[in-house]
Image (cartoon, rainbow, N blue to C red):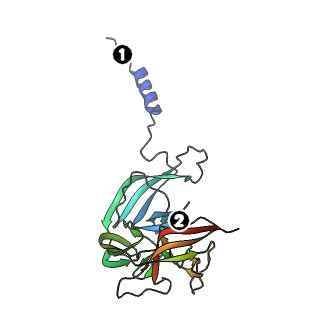
Amino acid sequence: MRTRSFAPFFLLTLVFVGCDRSTGPDDGYLEIREVTVGPTLAKCYGVGLQSCMVVDGGFFYDGIEGFEYEPGYDYRLRIGKYDPWGGEEPPQDASRYAYRLLEQLEKTPAPSTPATLSVGPTRVMCAQSDDFCLVVDGAPYDDMITSFEYEAGYHYILGANRYGDGQYVLSEVVSSTKATGTEEEITVDAHRVECDDGYPGYCKVVNGVPFRGEIVGFQPWHDYGYRLRVERFGMFPDGMTGSPEVPAYGYRWLETLESTPID
């Protein structure tokens, strides 16, 4: 009786098994870590003004591929960091690394308190940065209200939820009322000056004095002085007074009567 040897077949199988090194789902990442994501977005500055997720308590300037962010929830994620440029230099202003969601470990409603907010019809110079801020409950608010799309020129009453970080997520726009007033002419100087009202910041000069507010719809050229026709309106609903950093009135641009370049 003849017997067949399976040794060559067995050795060949070992060779193929030894060469089969399939990559796992976590291979190819420079770093894999667990992170927390907060319930609100925050105003931040990258290349320019943008909104950032709050990841592990700090601003996160990039997105996370595959992650669908919904405000109002605390998240715990497992993410992978990788180089999307294959070792090449990224384009100007592009991030060196990218991030991808590997697993959403937790999503829980974040504790919050209902709040009613009044938002003014124009923004004003922020007290902490050289930028414009919303006027919330009569004072500059140096952040954003998540999910709120602001259009200047309207008085708003908002329903919102306030979270543990002191920031808000919009729940509803209760009312939006167009700010109206009286027409007048104003002058706007070419250069800004220190606001000189006891608070930091540089203001445009309107009618010869620093003005901390913005002029709705006005897009000036650099180094030009202007004479404008505007509508002047109150910044606060009846019965409300504002902080000293907020002017009592705002302007809506109607017409440019004169523009003068300044040498």
**Mark 2 touching mark 1, by CB under 8 A?**
no
Q: Residue at x 32, y 78 (%)?
A: 115
Pick whichever of labels 2 and 1 is earlier in the sequence. Answer: 1
- Distance between mark 2 and mark 1 Cα atoms: 90 Å
Kind of residue indicated by mark 1? Arg
Q: Quadrant of residue 234?
A: bottom left
Instruction: From the image, tell me which residue sits under label 1.
Output: 4
Q: Residue at x 57, y 76 (%)?
A: 187
User: In front: 193, or 215?
Assistant: 215
Instruction: Answer left or right for 135 relative to 71.
Output: right
Image coords of residue 123 (percent x, y): 47, 74
Kind of residue indicated by mark 2? Gln
Image coords of residue 180 (percent x, y): 38, 76
Q: Residue at x 48, y 83 (%)?
A: 247
Identify the disc placed on residue 219.
Answer: 2
Around disc 1, counting alpha carbons within 10 Å, would you say few (fewer than 14), some (14 to 19), or many (20 or more)? Answer: few
Identify the disc placed on residue 13.
Answer: none
Q: Quadrant of the N terminus?
A: top left
Q: Residue at x 40, y 78 (%)?
A: 181
Q: Nearer the viewer, mark 2 or mark 1?
A: 2
